[in-house]
Image (spheres, helix red, strand yellow):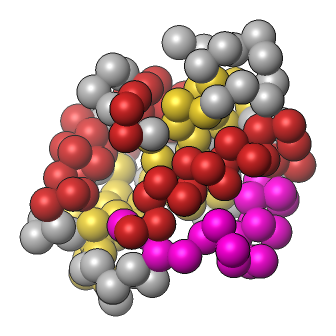
Amino acid sequence: MDVVVATSENFPGWLELAGEVEALFGPMVEDADFHQGLRSAIEEERAFCIREAPETPGSRLCGGIVILTWAREIAWFAVRKDCRGQGFGKALLAHAISRFEAGADICVQTFDSTVEEGRPARSLYRAFGFVDHKRCAPNSAGLPTVVMVRTKENE
């Protein structure tokens, strides 16, 4: 299971993955801002993915994660439904964390504890030392969210 830097050849696969999770995250596939943000992340090598066929840049994505190193933030993270529970999320999150400065606080906005579909993501974040920090406004899908933070003390 190889986590690799995403390339422009992966863009259609990212949109396919985004389409699969729009019900949880809100509109992305037809959103020009999402497209631009994703293209920037790919160009700046802040987007990482796991592909079904690692040797084939355009092959189907199993999952992807985008980080903002300067903000110490995980900006976007999803794993394809049929790939969940196989370690893809764990590999992606571990890789993303390794890209931040050692000991830096890292934050992520994710679902709050009332969102059933978000429990696996919350559980994964907690396994990596993230804890709820503050409540946030609902995401663009209307689901309640929180910011979770991983501090040096929680590593």
Q: Where residue 67 sits in the image (x, y, percent)?
A: 62, 51
Magenta highlight range: 24-41
Q: Is residue 101 visible?
A: no
Q: What kind of secondary structure does the magenta stretch mostly adopt?
A: helix
Residue 134 is drawn in which quadrant? bottom left
Q: Is residue 129 magenta?
A: no
Residue at left offset 47%, top offset 66%: 22
Q: Where residue 136 sits in the image (x, y, percent)?
A: 32, 83
Q: Relative to residue 77, is residue 145 depicted above or below? A: below
Q: Relative to residue 31, is residue 3 depicted above or below? A: above
Q: Nearer the viewer, residue 11 or 95?
A: 11
Residue at left offset 28%, top offset 73%: 146
Q: Nearer the viewer, residue 60 or 131?
A: 60
Q: Where residue 47 sits in the image (x, y, percent)?
A: 70, 44
Residue at left offset 18%, top offset 52%: 119
Query: Relative to 57, is 119 on the left or the right?
Result: left
Residue 117 is drawn in which quadrant? bottom left
Q: Relative to residue 11, is residue 68 depicted above or below? A: below
